[in-house]
Amino acid sequence: MKHTIEVMISEEEIKARVEQLGQQISEHYQHSDNLVMVGLLRGSFVFMADLARAITVNHSVDFMTASSYGNSMQSSRDVHILKDLDDNIEGKDVLLVEDIIDTGNTLSKVLQILNLRGPNSIQICTLLDKPIRREEDVDVKWVGFAIPDEFVVGVGIDYAQKYRHLPYIGKVIPSE
Ligand code: 5GP
Ligand code: MG
Ligand code: MG
């Protein structure tokens, strides 16, 4: 599909928001000595790196890849772990970092899986949220930006594996 990219959220706005999130998260975890940031690959890798540097509380980082196989004819969708965490999260304070929450299906399944491992706590921070698309109720503590139901790219988020490197969030506009 031929398309163009239109800036929706600028690099400057993102930088400022990541700083604010970093401060709020650091305050929340100021007494924690077992914080682990868990990034969901691949989309979260850029936000994860920026956010990690904005958090002043010492923490470790880990990553997992979850893939959801959606079938529009079915209401229940399965989430499959393609790459699991390297470390045990038992007793840890887990900060789950996501690029964008849409239906909430992926995150609610990942939460179920991680909760079985006995973490001390789990909270979610997402760069983007499309609240209007929500199907599964997920308690998201920190949201960078709530956006309308538009297909976006940039800051780690792809369109057919392209545009992850863009330093801003762009909207994909179909063109002929
Ligand atoms: P959910 O399980 O919440 O429906 O799915 C969230 C995932 O859908 C995101 O992590 C992302 O991979 C994908 N997604 C949702 N909205 C967008 C979007 O606007 N652009 C892109 N590139 N991916 C999206
Ligand atoms: Mg994602
Ligand atoms: Mg994708």
Image (spheres, grey):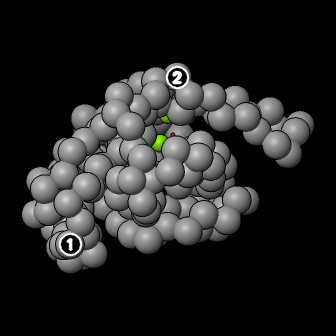
Q: Which amino acid does label 2 sit on?
A: Leu
Res 12 visible = no
Real-space Cα separation, disc 1 to disc 2, in angstroms: 33 Å
The residue at which mark 1 appears reads as 31
Front-most of 9 and 138? 138
Give the SS element for disc 2: strand
Q: Which residue is depicted at the point 42% across and 60% down?
A: 120
Q: Which residue is drawn at 70% across and 59% down?
A: 136
Q: Where is residue 137 in the image (x, y as percent from the top left)?
A: 67, 65
Q: Could you tell me how many numbered marks the image carries? A: 2
Task: Please rate how many residues cluster around mark 2, counting C-alpha atoms within 10 Å: few if below 14, some from 14 to 19, many from 20.
Answer: few
Q: Residue at x 35, y 28 (%)?
A: 86
Looking at the picture, which amino acid does disc 1 mark? His
Relative depth, front residue between 36 and 165: 36
User: Is the C-beta separation of discs 1 and 2 under 8 Å?
Assistant: no
> Foreground mark, 1 or 2?
1
Quarter assignment of residue 10: bottom left
Task: Tell me: residue 26, above or below residue 8.
Answer: below
Looking at the rendered image, the quarter that the C terminus falls into is: top right
Residue pointed to by mark 2 = 82
Looking at the rendered structure, the secondary structure element under dot 1 is loop
